[in-house]
């Protein structure tokens, strides 16, 4: 990639709701790209839509990014040379720049009421068409292009409601730009309407604020979702009207995240039906009584989730799937982002989490377990040995407690079907004799227990399969699990002997 200036990219979410994982993926790609090129990542909060503002949404964005390891070089929190970084604090700047557009003819005042525009839309639809405010009809509407300068000045003096609209080219032309994901993209100016840029209440719309801020913050690359692709020719025009075409950022529009079936954008409704979240963190909205679960609360490790998210629409050209954050940074390339939408696969997300659990050192997992209420009264050494035995069998760390109850207390129930399959006339005798030999072992560790069982089987000329299943049931109550000698060593000799005695007494009523 030919970089003509220092890389400065931004993640610019709107706090109008709680951040979808599609937005978090955009933040991640911005982060990877900036770090790959020793650049700067800016967090800008685009909060100009005050009517849809959701309390707590900005903090949620910060918390979600922090959870997956995204760090911002400039933001409302850490500051920077190009602040403020909340658009609501930059209104005076937008007022200055909308005045420039009005003066140079790139925009105009429009005084049409919402009711009159709605009537126009309805009449066009009734005639089988659609209404667009643009070069084809703006000279028939109520705006500064059809009124005298004195009339416009009087309306403004009286405080009339107005909007300021972009003035698209009068003659149709092709607007072409290069997208680093999609290549060369062309729109016709006739496809663009005269978008509202500014309102009489002093608030800009997304289009004006976005372009002005990207220019003033010296953004070199705009990485955002493909839903903004159709707005880009409008932004290209704004760069032209301001005289900023030479410093216009390069664009990269990311593919949609799709529902698991591949049809439609990944939605909360569809995800709820399938039993998984679409938000990185759980949230609740006191104003609407809505709430949603999050991947963090489900038990996903942040590094596993980040790895999974990075591969939703990108790969390095190989079959490799497991990457650390540093490895993602080294491998990331915008031109390897896919054009097609990426289907969300929750089972794959769980697979990533399982892989990360397997590869996480036992002492780190133990530290996490010690924060759980179930760990109360349990030693660090015991938990560390136990998680080492069971982490390969887990998808989420919290499953450890569900799958290892027998490590902490003797089984109260037994897998009756497995018991009946393994029970033979001499099973009770074999278990009793094994118990006696366990009591006599000089050292009671996994190796000694395993050798004791093998020696007994050889002496009695029976297969290990005649001993291990009923012994496992006696110690754990279930028919499968981790290495039985290691389980025996972990719960220790006295408990093993006690559980064999209890099992032989209880099984009389089950057989």
Image (spheres, rainbow, N blue to C red):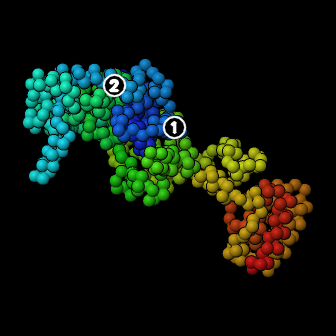
One can see residue 318 in this view = no
Residue 438 image offset from top left, x and y in percent? 86, 62
Residue 436 image offset from top left, x and y in percent? 89, 66
Q: Residue at x 24, y 38 (%)?
A: 185
Q: Is residue 213 above or below residue 407?
A: above
Name which quarter of the figure residue 394 lies in.
bottom right
Q: Secondary structure at mark 2?
A: helix
Residue 64 image offset from top left, x and y in percent? 50, 39
Residue that numbered label 1 is attached to: 63
Name which quarter of the figure residue 470 lies in.
bottom right
Whole-number angstrom distance, CA of label 2 to CA of label 1: 26 Å
Q: Is residue 99 above or below residue 231?
A: above
Q: Secondary structure at mark 1?
A: helix
Query: Counting residues from the N terminus, which is met first, the one under dot 2 or under dot 1?
Result: 1
Q: Which mark is residue 7?
A: none
Q: Residue at x 36, y 55 (%)?
A: 262
Residue that numbered label 2 is attached to: 91
Q: Residue at x 63, y 55 (%)?
A: 399
119 or 304: which is nearer to us?
A: 119
Quadrant containing the N terminus in the rendered view: top left
On the rendered structure, is 414 left or right of 231? Answer: right
Mark 2–mark 1 CB contact (< 8 Å): no
């Amino acid at each position: 990639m030919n970089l003509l200036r220092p890389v400065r990219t931004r993640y610019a979410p709107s706090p109008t709701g709680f951040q979808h994982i599609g937005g978090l993926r955009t933040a991640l790609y911005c982060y990877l790209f900036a770090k790959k090129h020793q650049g700067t990542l800016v967090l800008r909060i685009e909060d100009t839509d005050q009517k849809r503002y959701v309390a707590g949404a900005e903090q949620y964005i910060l918390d979600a990014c922090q959870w997956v390891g995204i760090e911002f070089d400039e933001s409302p929190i850490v500051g920077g040379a190009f602040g403020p970084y909340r658009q609501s604090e930059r209104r005076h700047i937008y007022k200055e720049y909308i005045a420039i557009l009005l003066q140079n003819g790139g925009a105009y005042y429009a005084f049409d009421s919402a009711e009159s525009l709605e009537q126009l839309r309805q009449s066009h639809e009734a005639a089988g068409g659609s209404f667009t405010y643009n070069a084809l009809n703006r000279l028939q509407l109520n705006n500064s292009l059809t009124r005298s300068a004195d009339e416009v000045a009087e309306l403004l003096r009286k405080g009339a409601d107005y909007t300021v609209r972009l003035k698209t080219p009068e003659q149709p032309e092709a607007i072409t730009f290069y997208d680093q994901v999609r290549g060369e993209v062309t729109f016709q100016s006739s496809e663009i309407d005269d978008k509202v840029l500014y309102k009489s209440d002093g608030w800009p719309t997304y289009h004006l604020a976005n372009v002005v801020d990207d220019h003033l913050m010296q953004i070199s690359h705009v990485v955002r979702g493909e839903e903004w692709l159709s707005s880009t020719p409008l932004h290209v025009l704004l760069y032209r009207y301001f005289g900023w075409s030479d410093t216009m950022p390069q664009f990269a529009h990311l593919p949609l995240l799709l529902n698991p079936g591949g049809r439609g954008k990944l939605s909360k409704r569809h995800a709820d039906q399938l039993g998984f979240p679409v938000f990185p963190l759980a949230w609740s909205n006191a104003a609407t009584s809505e709430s949603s679960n999050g991947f963090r609360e489900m038990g996903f490790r942040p590094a596993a989730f980040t790895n999974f998210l990075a591969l939703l629409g990108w790969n390095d050209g190989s079959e490799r799937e497991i990457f650390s954050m540093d490895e993602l940074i080294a491998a990331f390339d915008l031109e390897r982002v896919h054009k097609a939408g990426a289907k969300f696969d929750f089972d794959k997300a769980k697979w990533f989490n399982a892989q990360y659990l397997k590869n996480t050192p036992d002492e780190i997992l133990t530290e996490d377990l010690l924060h759980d209420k179930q760990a109360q009264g349990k030693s660090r050494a015991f938990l560390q040995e136990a998680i080492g035995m069971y982490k390969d069998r887990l998808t989420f760390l919290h499953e450890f407690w569900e799958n290892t109850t027998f490590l902490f207390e003797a089984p109260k129930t037994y897998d009756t079907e497995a018991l009946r399959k393994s029970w033979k006339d001499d099973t009770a005798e074999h278990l009793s004799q094994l118990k006696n030999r366990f009591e006599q072992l000089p050292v009671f560790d996994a190796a000694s227990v395993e050798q004791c069982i093998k020696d007994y089987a050889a002496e009695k000329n029976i297969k290990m399969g005649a001993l291990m299943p009923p012994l496992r049931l006696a110690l754990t109550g279930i028919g499968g699990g981790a290495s039985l000698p290691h389980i025996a060593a972990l719960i220790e000799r006295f408990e093993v002997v006690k559980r064999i005695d209890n099992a032989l007494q209880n099984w009389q009523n089950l057989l």
